[in-house]
Image: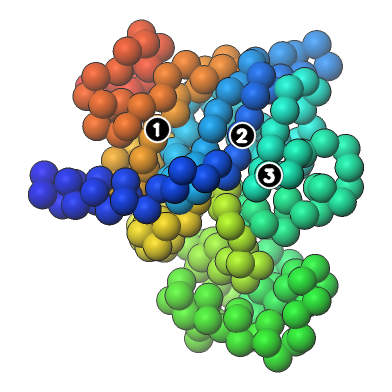
Amino acid sequence: MTEVATERTADRTKMSISDEVAIQITNMNKWYGDFHVLRDINLTVYRGERIVICGPSGSGKSTMIRCINRLEEHQKGDIIVDGIELNSDLKNIDKIRAEVGMVFQHFNLFPHLTILENCTLAPIWVRKTPRRQAEEIAMHFLTKVKIPDQAHKYPGQLSGGQQQRVAIARALCMKPRIMLFDEPTSALDPEMIKEVLDTMIELAEEGMTMLCVTHEMGFARQVANRVIFMDQGQIVEQNEPEEFFLNPKSDRTKLFLSQILGH
C-alpha cells in the first residue's frame, strides 16, 4: 500500500468509530484447572472499531474472544456486550449470541446441508425469519462474498477459501452488530487467504465492529484501528497500527514482530 492509500484507510476507519461502547471487559480472568490462561483482561471496544489481536501461540488470544460470546466461560471479572452482562443467565447468553457473529478457523459448516441451508438455519430458528425472507437474506450475503452461484452446492464441493466466505456470509445472515474472527485464514492455502481477507476488508470499510485474531499483519495495517499484542494470558501492548509496528514499546512485542515480520 502507498502512503496515500494508508492515510485514506486510516482516515476512513477513524471516521466511523462511535463513542458508544460495544464491549466492555473488566478485570476478566480465566483458568483451565490450575492453569491461569487469562490474567486481568481490561478492554473497551467502541461501536465501529476494528481490532486485530496478535501474539504467540498459547497467549490466550482465541480464548479471550471466545469468552465474549460464552463459548468459553470466564471465572472472574465482568464482560458486558451491547449493554448486556455476560453471566450464567441463559437468556443473556442467547441475546448476546444473536448479536455477535463468529467465524472460526475451521469453517464449522454443516456438511449435509447446502450452502443456502447453512446460511438460513439460524435466521429461521433463532430470529424466526420466514423461510423465503431468510433465503433472500442469504442470497444477498452470498452475493456480497461473491459466491451466489455456490448456493445449492454442499460444503465439500467448495474450496477452503469459498467455505470460509460461506462461514462469513452465514454469520452476516443473523445481521450481527459485532463480528469475531478466530484465525480465519490460518487453515487456508496461501492462494485462498487473499479472497477471505478481501471479504473482511469490505466488512471493515462498511463500519462493522470487528475483533480479529490473526497473524496477517498486512490486514492489521490496512484495516485495524487498534492492534493488541497478547502474551502469557495478558494484554501486553495496544496501539494504532502505525505506532504499534513502527514503535513497539514492550520487548516482548519487539521480539514477536521481529519473528513474524522477519526483521
**Vertical relation: 59 (above or below) 1:** above
What count of labels does the image hold? 3
Task: Identify the mark nearer the N-term, 2 or 3.
Answer: 2
Q: Mark 1 is on which residue type?
A: Val
Instruction: Return the mark for residue 227.
Output: 1
Q: Which residue is mark 2?
A: 24
Q: Could you tell me which quadrant the C terminus lies in?
A: top left
Q: Mark 2 is on which residue type?
A: Gln
- Camera-side residue of 13 and 224: 13
Q: Which residue is mark 3?
A: 83
Q: Is residue 231 left or right of residue 102?
A: left
Which of label 2 and label 3 is nearer to you?
3
Would you call the spot at circle 1 few (<14 residues within 10 Å), some (14-19), or many (20 or more)? many
CA–CA distance between discs 2 and 1?
Answer: 17 Å
**Vertical relation: 121 (above or below) 75:** below
CA–CA distance between discs 1 and 3?
Answer: 24 Å
Residue 236 in the image: state x and y as whole percent.
Answer: 47, 16
Task: Identify the mark nearer the N-term, 2 or 1.
Answer: 2
CB-based contact (under 8 Å), mark 1 and mark 3:
no
Residue 118, visible in the rendered structure: yes
Which element is circle 2 on?
A: strand
Residue 115 in the image: state x and y as whole percent.
Answer: 64, 77
Residue name at image x 47 percent, y 56 percent = 208
Q: Is residue 96 left or right of residue 184?
A: right
Task: Identify the mark nearer the N-term, 1 or 3.
Answer: 3
Which of label 1 and label 3 is nearer to you?
3
Residue 240 in the image: state x and y as whole percent.
Answer: 32, 32
Q: Is residue 109 left or right of residue 49?
A: right
